[in-house]
Structures are given as structure tokens and as C-alpha cells.
Image (cartoon, rainbow, N blue to C red):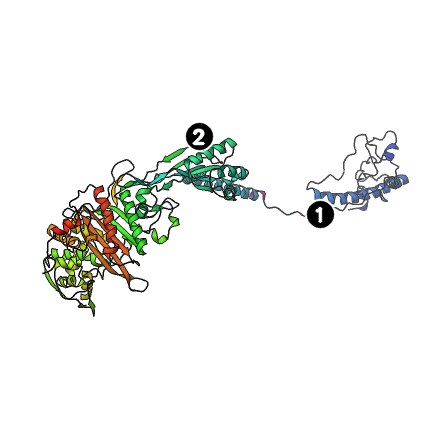
Amino acid sequence: MPADRRTPPDPPRPTRSRTTGSAASRARAPQGVHPRSDREPRPAAPRSGQPRPAQSRAGQSRTAQSRTAQSRTAQSRTSQSRTSQSRSAQPRPAQRRPAQGRPSARPGATAAGSTRLGSWLGLPEGGRRPPVRRRRTLRIPLGSSTRRLRIGLLVIAMAVSLCAGRLLQLQGFDSSAYAAASTEQLTRTLALLPARGEITDRNGVVLASTEPAVDITADPTLTSKNAQAIAAIIDRYVDQDPGQTVAALTKPNTRFAYVAKKVPAAVYTQIAQDLSTAGYYGVFRESDPIRTYPAGAVGAGIVGFVGGDNDGVAGFEYARNKQLAGVEGKESYESAPDGSKIPLGTSVVTPAQNGVSYQLSIDSELQWVAEQRLAAQVSKLKADYGFAITMDVRTGQILALANAPSYDASDPGASDPADRGNRAVQETYEPGSVEKILTSAALIDSGTANPDTKVVVPNRVASGGGLIKDVEDHGTVDYRMRGIVAHSSNIGMLLLTRQLPKATLVNYLSSFGLGQPTGIELPAEASGTVPPASMPDYSRDQIAFGQGLSVTGVQEAAAIAGIINGGIYHAPTVVASATSPDGTPADLNRPAPRRVVSAQTSAEVRGLMQAVVYGIKSRSSLSMDHYQTGGKTGTAQRADPKCGCYRGYVTSYVNFAPLNDPSILTYVVINNPRQGNPTGTGNAAPVANDIMQFALPRYGVEPDQKDFADQAAQYTLPLTW
């Protein structure tokens, strides 16, 4: 293209500077110039081929200055633009129009004016502020907003699902369990103790009864603040250490504490009234009846006693604890935080079932006589212990069962623990010559012998590598079986028993109740021991006269009673009747009577026992006034468990009356007497006779003889041949 046709470029468009639009330059703007204009009007561009008009020198100077200012302004705006771009994503316009009414710089203004104005305003040379360096803020780039929204919604959905699942568990699946737990926290349950059954003797005399009483309890969270004042009221009626009361009322970290136990109900009523009047709360009660024993020591070995928890510990109280105790009830009710019952809240009562009441076969007056007489004899003989059993032979009922030494059921702790049992039931011993009654019954009933069987009795007989002798020293004697029993000859009874097979002897002894519990309603009954049929010969020899086997007093008395009662055995019992809580008779589950020997055998054995009392004229001490009687003495070597040897003696005596129609039997045993002559005649017989003399008329047994001499004179049956 030709050079003269080239179009010169347009001059750069001036950019308004913020400093050039000052008030001084606007004030010097000439007339006719628009006040908003800050630059000269742009001349029209020459058409193609036309020469550009020449500018004046002054105009060129102004143009150069304007370009310089524009260049500086542009640089300043570029720096500011970079800073602002970091603050905002929105770009700011490169220039803006001046505010309405703002005068533009006059055409002739120079850079020097701007410099002076900037200096006056405190700006650096050139009129521009230096760029502000700002600390860059650390910004973590975020992910997609859509993804963040989705994750947030997912988290919310999971939380809602968990809440919904828990709600379903509470209201759907486990609603009953949680409702029950809530109810349990609001519900208080009190035990309703039943009334323990009463124990009376055969005549209705109370031997054991229950009186209303309570245990005083407290909620220490309610009583701690006024503990001293509350304790003062309680100690006014309860005999206990005041410090103990305060300690219970202030017991830490609990809402339950026992303050006093076994407080009579009437006493607690007065305490509760005084506490209510004083405005003290937090003291409560629990039913805890008191067991009383009005008879004290009378029959204690039979009745027994209860412990602090009202459960039987000894005697009949222990043996029949379940029946006497009854069935505990309960009361459940909704309670307030202070333990008080909510008046309109739910309340459920399960009534307690009272215990069975028992009437024992024991006669408390006869029991007292037996205990007093026995205790005096045991003390006189300095014996280890003794017991006396009085039975109704026609029913097996025990009328008296005395032990010496004994204890007071109202205060058992004051006695020796060894004396709190019943030795007639729990202790075993070798019965001695009283056993000859059982051996004779077996011999007669089996047909091996009869009362008139003749036996030549030497003064010694060999047995088991040793020699056996009689208590009465004699030469060879021609005894009838009646005489063997009357003189208590060990040798004579041994010679007769050798004719009886061992198995037959064992069967008879077992049928009499030996070697097994009798089932009497008392605890810890011993069984005793009977050798088996395979026993050696010397064991049979010993059993014949009451050694080599062991029995209890109840076993021996019941066996003899069965033999003399026409051969009908009644299991011994201390219970006459029982009454259920509703007043109806309770079943006693008593075993049926059984025959052990024939009636003929029974009569012949009674005749042998008559010979013991009346066949020897010098034994007037065995007889009783006004009553014909039969009896048998016993003196056995005492087995001492400490040394495993025989040491001391066990003396005994059994008798019954009337002779031909037995009604009452008494059996007395004295263990290890250390004073006097150790024989049944001298030690045990006096006690038995005294008890019988009281019992027979008491139970309406008519006298059938005048005196011993009269009856002895009438006895004419031979003892020898």
C-alpha cells in the first residue's frame, strides 16, 4: 500500500485519574465547559486521504501531560484491580463516570498541581496511595455442593432411622418390659407375715403363741436432719443404746435401715403417734411377730424355739416349721418418693396364709412333774443326763417326755447348747436288761420258749473268747424262763436265745421298730443299730441281754408298749391333733397300727414283767400303791465314745399299769450315774413309780390293789424248777 494512503493510529483515549478530579481543578474550569467533562472533546477522525490537522504546541504539551497522568492512573488501577479481584470474583469497571455536578479538571491543569494537592492530603509524590498489602486468607477448597447436600441428607436419614428404630423398640417390642421397669420403680412391696401356728398341750394350755410385733425401720435420707429428736422419742419406749438408734437414723448412702426389732405392736403405735405429733417423718415398720413360750422350761425339749427370723431352730418348732409358719403374703402399692402410699394409686394385696396350729399329746402338768422328779434324781446321782417317757400304750401318744438337764424356751441362750435337744430321741445307748422283754417276746412268739421253759443256768458261760456272768453271783440254778426274767439272768437268757435263728431274731427286733427311726415328730431322731443276720454268735449272745445293739429311748418305750398292748404297735407321736387356718382338721399322716406279736404272747410277756415286781418278795420298791403293775430293770455297761471302751453304766426301769389292761407306760433312763449303786432298781425305778402314781389317777385309771404285800402274797407262779 502507498505510504501516503496509510492512516495514522488514533491517539489513546485519556483515562480519568481520581487525583485530577480535585476540587481545585474543578474550580478553575472555564465557562462553557461541561462540569462533568474531565478531558477535551475528541476531534473527529479524518477521512481516508485527508491530512490530520496540526496541533498547537500548548495542546501537544497538555496532551503529553494527560497521557502521562493517564498512564500512571492506569497502573494504579491495575494494581487495585488485582487486589480487588482476589476479594471478589466480580470485576469492577475500569472507569466510572464522575459524580453529578463534579467539575472536571481544567484543560490547562498540569501534573504539578496534582502533586501539590497530593502533598497537601498527605499522599506520596505523584498523588497516589501505595498499594495495600493484605494478608492472604487460607481457604480450603470445598467439594461439589450437590455432593455435600446428598451426604448431609444421608446423615439426616440415618439419624432419623435410628430414632425411629429406638422408638419402635420402646413402643413396640419392649414396651411391656419398660412399662414394668417403670412400674417397679414406683411400686413398693411389703411382706405380709402370716400368723405362726399356735402350739398347745392336750388340754389346750398354750405352750407357744405369737404376739403382734414390728421391726422399726427408717429412711435415713428423711431422718438424718432430725435424728437426735427422733431417737429421743424412740428410746423413750425401746430399751437400747441411744447411739445405736442415731446411727441407724443417719446411716449414709441408703434409704433403708433397721432401728429396732421385735417391738410390740402397741408400743410402736405410741411411738408413731408421738412422731406424727412432733412432725417427724421417715420412720416405718415391718411386721415381725414375737414368739412367746408361756410355759417356759416345761416341755421345752419337745416344743423347741424359733430364731430371730421366726423360723424354728429346735424341737417341734423346727420339725414342723413349714406347717407352723404358713405362707407369706405381700402388699404392692404405688408410693411417693418419701415412701408414703399414693391414695389413688394401684394397690394389690396377696393375703398371707396363717400356719397350722397343733395340739400336742403332752400333758403340761404331767410334764412338769416328770421334769421336776427327773432333774432331782439326776442331780442326786451326779449323772450326765436322764430322760423319762410316759406313753399311752393304746395310742402311742407321748404324755410326757422329760429331759434333764433342760432349758427355758423363752431364753434358750442361757443354757448349754448340748441341753437344747431331746436326748430321748437323739441319743443312742445300749439298753441293758430292759431288752430282755423284747428278746422274751421273740422267743415266746416264735415258739422257741414259754414262761415255764426250764433252763439250767451255770454261774459262767463262754462267749466270744470271754466269759459272761450274772449280776447276782450264784452257782448252777434251775430257772424257769419266768425266773430268768425275774432275776435278770444274762446267762439264762443267752442260753434260750441261742436256740433262736439269728435271722428270726433280727426280724423280730426290726418289727419292734429298732434300727430305724420311729417317725416321731421331733427333729434329728437317731436310728440306732441292729446287727445283721450274718452277725457272729457272740453278737447274738450280747443282744439277748441288751448289749451289742443301740437304741433310743423312744424306740425302746414304743417297742415295749406295742408288746404289752395285746401285740399291737402304735408309732410314738407327740401330736394329738392339728387345725388348718380355716378351722378344719389337718391330716396328720400317721402310720397305721401293726401287729408285732400275738395277743397270747403279749399276755405272757406281761406275766414275766409281773414276776419282776412281785416274784421276789424283797423288791417292794418296784411296786406302786393301789395299782398292779409290771416292770423291768436295766443296768448296761456304758459305751464311752471318747475312749472307744465301756466306762460307767446306763441304768433304766420301765413299768406299766394296770397289769391286765395296760393304759400307761413310763420308761426312765439315767446315764452314767456317779453317786450311789448304779442299778435300775435304785436309780431309775423311784422316778418311774412317782410319775406313774401321778399319771394313773389323773387319767382316771381305777385302782386294782391295796398294797404290795397283798399283791405279793397272791403271786404264786414258780420261778425255778
Query: From mark 1 to mark 2, how far is it between C-alphas?
Result: 74 Å
Q: Is residue 509 magenta?
A: no
573 w.r.t. 536: above or below = above
The residue located at (17%, 43%) in the rendering is: 703
Range shown magenta: 128-146
Check residue 139 for magenta coloring: yes
Q: Which residue is mark 1?
A: 136
Q: Which mark is drawn over residue 343?
A: 2
313 sits left or right of 442 in the view? right
In the rendering, at what x and y percent does residue 696 appear? 21, 44
What kind of residue is marked 2? Pro
Element type where label 1 sits in the image: loop
Would you say 600 lies left or right of 83 here? left
Q: Nearer the viewer, mark 1 or mark 2?
A: 2
- Residue 113 sits in which quadrant? top right
Residue count near mark 2 (Cα–Cα under 10 Å), binned few <14, some 14–19, many ≥20 = few
Magenta span: chief secondary structure: loop
